[in-house]
């Protein structure tokens, strides 16, 4: 069996943690996307950094090797819904952390209209009321792929399916 893999941090904290402008920007993003703590933001920044590093290394590769790696990178980002069909490496370098935060299940549930706020979206996900493609997802940080956007729905055994649920009645009154 062997020893389990050593757990590692999936993020990197800022080098200068007490800069007022950085703190203000982080706090704004935390509120806008309903993140639990700054680690979730730092994780998204780490993912962005990883993709941008790969894109930068592509610019220095020989043409025959670059084509294969570039196709894989752009294909992965297209499936995630971060770049368009005819994207280039320059568009990968133009990505921002907000683009990754928009792909989180928590934000998508809010954008689809299944929750009134991003905080309520987080609660619905954690409590098991949301499914993606029929599979219950309880992680608000789940990255929704482009094809899964239309498959986000309430869980079949969730009380939120009922039209008499107070959340649905309140939403109907607000829109009507």
Image: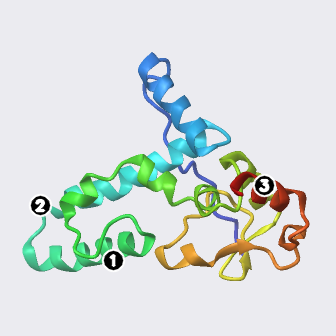
User: Based on the displayed image, in which of its 4 quarters is residue 108 positioned?
Assistant: bottom right
Front position in the image: 83 or 45 = 83
Residue 138: give x, y in percent of width and height. Answer: 75, 64
Residue 129: give x, y in percent of width and height. Answer: 80, 66
SS for callout 2: loop
| Alpha carbon separation for disc pair 2 and 1 | 20 Å
**Looking at the image, which residue sits at the far front?**
176
Residue at image point 89% right, 57% down: 166
Q: Earlier in the sequence, mark 2 or mark 3?
A: 2
- Name the residue that disc number 3 marks: 173
**How is the rendered protein coloured?**
rainbow
SS for callout 1: helix
- Name the residue that disc number 1 marks: 75
**Looking at the image, which residue sits at the far bottom?**
134
Residue 8: give x, y in percent of width and height. Answer: 58, 51
**Marks 2 and 1 in Cβ contact (< 8 Å):** no
**Looking at the image, which residue sits at the far left?**
63
Circle 2 or circle 3, nearest the eye = 3
Q: Is residue 130 at all visible to an observer of this figure?
A: yes
Please, is residue 4 above or below residue 135 in the view?
Answer: above
Front position in the image: 154 or 162 = 162
Judge the density around disc 2: few (<14), some (14-19), many (≥20) Cα neighbours within 10 Å.
few
Q: Is residue 19 at all visible to an observer of this figure?
A: no
- Name the residue that disc number 2 marks: 60
Residue 93 shown left or right of residue 150 in the figure:
left
SS for callout 3: helix
Please, is residue 8 above or below residue 146 in the view?
Answer: above
């Amino acid at each position: 069996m062997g020893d389990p893999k050593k757990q590692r941090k999936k993020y990197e904290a800022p080098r200068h943690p007490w800069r007022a402008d950085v703190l203000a920007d982080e706090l704004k993003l935390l509120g806008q996307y309903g993140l639990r703590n700054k680690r979730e933001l730092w994780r998204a920044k780490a993912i962005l950094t990883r993709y941008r590093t790969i894109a930068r290394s592509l610019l220095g590769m020989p043409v025959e090797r670059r084509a294969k790696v570039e196709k894989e990178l752009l294909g992965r980002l297209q499936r995630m819904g971060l770049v368009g069909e005819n994207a280039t490496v320059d568009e990968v370098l133009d990505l921002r952390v907000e683009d990754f935060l928009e792909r989180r299940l928590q934000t998508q549930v809010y954008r689809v209209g299944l929750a009134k706020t991003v905080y309520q979206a987080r609660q619905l996900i954690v409590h098991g009321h949301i499914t993606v493609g029929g599979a219950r997802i309880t992680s608000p940080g789940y990255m929704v792929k482009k094809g899964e956007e239309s498959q986000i729905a309430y869980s079949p055994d969730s009380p939120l399916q009922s039209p008499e649920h107070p959340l649905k009645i309140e939403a109907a009154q607000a829109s009507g």
